Amino acid sequence: MNRSQLTQKFVDHGYKSSTSSVYAATLIGFNHGMNIPDDKKWVSKSLVKEVMDKELKPTSKRNILSAMIAFLKLYKTPEGDPVYELLGYQRDVLNKEYIANANKIGIQKKPDAGTMKEGFDNAHEDLNKLGFFKQSGFIAADIVQSRVMELVVFLFYMYPFSDPESNFAPLRNDLCTFHLRVPRETNPSVNTFYPKSGKKPGRLRLVDHKTVDKTGPYDVELPDFVNGMLATFIRRMGVKPGELIFPHLKKTSITQILNKLSRRYIGSSISTQLLRRYYVSMRFSDDKAQREEVAKNMGHNLEVQDKIYTY
């Protein structure tokens, strides 16, 4: 199979076109530009050894192994298959090696967990100074509303780094797509925020997101602080049921806000993608079950997490 044929084979198996293209390019490139046999036996133990023996960066080797795992899945190869198990084992080895190197050169410490927590606390203090959390006395001038919105967005994405025990993970740039729930609506067609009600915790219901074709809609349970902050913002801004919570916010705006406020509060520019990578790396574990739990909280699968988000 040439690159185009291999890409289509991945697409037909259910992979996204962009992922399929990357997998096909990776395998063709590893195979010195030659076509790939339409046969799962092409991926053998000797081929895995060839990957590991090459003088490549750990990330490059890991990407090749991930593409080979995806290739085997095209042929419904069971996880107990010896070659499949070897691929998974070697990829885990590369993950550990990369984490170890990252720790040595300080990748995970720029910024470190303490800096992230301090940045969150300082932003929280500034939002409090604006009277946001008071029952009265809030000044609703446009410039204040703009500052409040930026701080709420920043704190929403930074919260996971303020509470290491929380399972709440940074979302993608989806915050701008959420609507306030409509009472008694149980099957929303849009991303919806359900405020805390009695003993039921607040949650976000994602029905429209980039991985919905594979994962389907899913719920994100909100910590009390995040739920309370969003509920207060809705009350302050007069958001009505069914309306967008952040009507003037776009996905690109979220990146701009995070870049601006992270420079102010953390000293370095960050994005949602970087925050998600920081989150996964800070919670990296040799235990597969723990990594799967993190992947579930992130809204993707373990394969995507190990390939894209793990430092």
Image: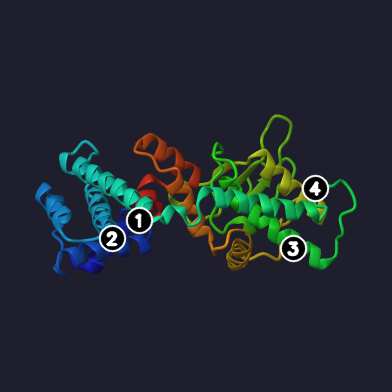
* Nearer the camera: disc 4 or disc 1: 4
* Nearer the camera: disc 3 or disc 2: 3
- Residue at the image point whose x is 27% and y is 54% from the top: 62
* Dot placed on the residue nearer the N-terminal end, 4 or 2: 2
69, above or below 139, in the image: above
**Where residue 136 sits: x, y (%)?**
89, 49
**Where residue 170 sits: x, y (%)?**
55, 50
Q: CA distance from mark 3 to mark 2?
A: 43 Å
Q: CA distance from mark 4 to mark 1?
A: 45 Å
Could you say whether the residue bearing mark 3 is in a helix, strand or loop? Answer: helix
Find disc 4 in the rendering and name its residue.
Answer: 133
* Nearer the camera: disc 4 or disc 2: 4
Q: What amino acid type is highlighted by mark number 1?
A: Tyr
Q: What amino acid type is highlighted by mark number 3?
A: Arg
Residue 15, disc? 1
**Where residue 264 sits: x, y (%)?**
63, 63
Q: CA distance from mark 4 to mark 2?
A: 49 Å
Compared across the picture, whether 146 is left or right of 270 comes to right
Assess disc 4: are there few (<14), some (14-19) or many (≥20) residues with their C-alpha within 10 Å of its C-alpha: some
Would residue 283 be visible to someone looking at this image? yes
* Nearer the camera: disc 2 or disc 1: 2
187, above or below 122, in the image: above
Assess disc 3: are there few (<14), some (14-19) or many (≥20) residues with their C-alpha within 10 Å of its C-alpha: some
CB-based contact (under 8 Å), mark 3 and mark 4: no
CB-based contact (under 8 Å), mark 4 and mark 1: no
Residue 23, disc? 2
* Dot placed on the residue nearer the N-terminal end, 2 or 1: 1
* Nearer the camera: disc 1 or disc 3: 3
